[in-house]
Image (spheres, rainbow, N blue to C red):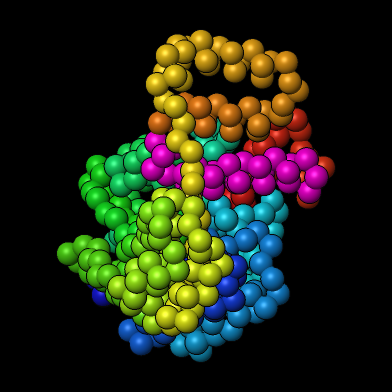
Amino acid sequence: MPRTRILHISDTHLGKRQYGSDIRREDFAKAFEQAIEVAVERDVDAVIHTGDLFDDPVPSLPTVMRAADALKPLEEHGIPFYGIVGNHERKNDEQWLDLLRRTSAAARLGKEPTMVGEVALYGIDAVRPSVWDNIDLELEEPPAEAAWTILCMHELLTPLVHGMGRVYPASEVIDRAGIDLDGLALGDLHQPASSVVDGTDVWYASATERGGKDQEETGVVQLLDIDNSGIHRRQIELETRPFAVFEIAFGEDDGATHARDVLERHDLEGAVAKIELSGERAAVTANEVTQMAREAGAAVVSVDDNRGRVDLDVESIEAMSLQGLDGAIEEKLADEDFSTVALDVDQQVRKADELDTNVNRVADTFAESLRDAQREAFDDAGPEETPEGVESLEVDE
Ligand SMILES: [Mn+2]
């Protein structure tokens, strides 16, 4: 078969004003533009984007226009851009990707194959957790000329991801797809990861920019080189803004001088400075630290002031039987008229032992459930909606 090259990018989160910063919004746009440049320079046969093109279900007009502009070089070079819809940008009916599709800048992948050379590409948009068990994931058979098959999804799957809220086994996806899958190209995890599951190559592309201080391996894209011998993947790094993530611990007598000393030990020039203040409440404010970091050259500064936190008396809580504690909470909850979403959030917070390590992820999931519930209640739910009609709101086939 002829060689086919596909650039896999994901989680570009266009429009994200990280830490409330316009500079960061610009960084996210630039990372996407760089990824497109890579596609043009390497003259790939297609680009696949596995979701969260936009950070928000309602991106601003300038953000949408910037995305359309960024895609122009692909059009000029005849390189198709194929996408699926991620959980961040998902709307109930038409998607932003549909708008870009109308300008012929982009196309959506679906359960029917899209051929690039002899590679059959498929895509399934991010699935709402509430319909995961029942949704049809079965793909159409590939045509006879297809030598390889790749499915694009935006989900957190084991064994590549653990303990991050709702995760599903990759083996289940491969099984439910119902065809012989050679590759499962994934988005949603903001770091690269790969594995082989039941003979299928499974991998995450990573985000193109760093979405949080704990995402250390972002800013990369994956170049897929597909020939007779299989799907070969090469990671290409983008140039992204450096992060300086550190803590300033204050003792009782520490003040501005101490803060300055710690700041001096880090290279902040042009960086995103993500600083945690810990220890004693001292005679220097978070604002002053922000100012100092700016003076030291940081382009973007975000300070978490965690000084003077009172630790919970764990022993006295443990002394109360946990069973009794849960029982007491259930009793109180039963007295209140909470929505199912609220109760679901409560349940998950109380039973999640992974909360400590993945607060952001869990918060993300909650934000998503809340948004979904909000939309079901107020938005463009449409006439076909029934009380259990979540399925009717599901993405296009
Ligand atoms: Mn994402």
Image quarter where the N terminus lies is: bottom left
Residue at the image point whose x is 17% and y is 64% from the top:
229
Residue at the image point whose x is 25% and y is 63% from the top:
231
Above/below status of 287 relative to 169: below
Which residue occupies the foreground of this view, 175 or 144?
Answer: 175
Residue 77, image x, y percentages:
46, 88
Magenta region, mostly helix, strand or loop? Answer: helix
| Magenta run includes residue 338 | no
The image quadrant that residue 209 belongs to is bottom left
| Magenta run includes residue 378 | yes
Residue 11, image x, y percentages:
47, 63
Q: How many marks?
A: 0
The image quadrant that residue 378 belongs to is top right
Which residue occupies the foreground of this view, 248 or 356?
Answer: 248
154 with respect to 20 (left or right): left
Q: Which residues are magenta?
A: 354-379
Residue at the image point whose x is 41% and y is 67% from the top:
259
**In the orientation shown, which residue stands out farthest toward the front?**
253
Which residue occupies the foreground of this view, 11 or 127?
Answer: 11
Residue 193 visible: yes
Above/below status of 308 relative to 8: above
Residue 56, image x, y percentages:
62, 61
Residue at the image point whose x is 51% and y is 64% from the top:
284
Above/below status of 216 relative to 28: above
375 with respect to 364 (left or right): right
Residue 296, image x, y percentages:
42, 80
**In the orientation shown, which residue stands out farthest toward the left?**
229
Residue 124 visible: no
Which residue occupies the foreground of this view, 283 or 47?
Answer: 283
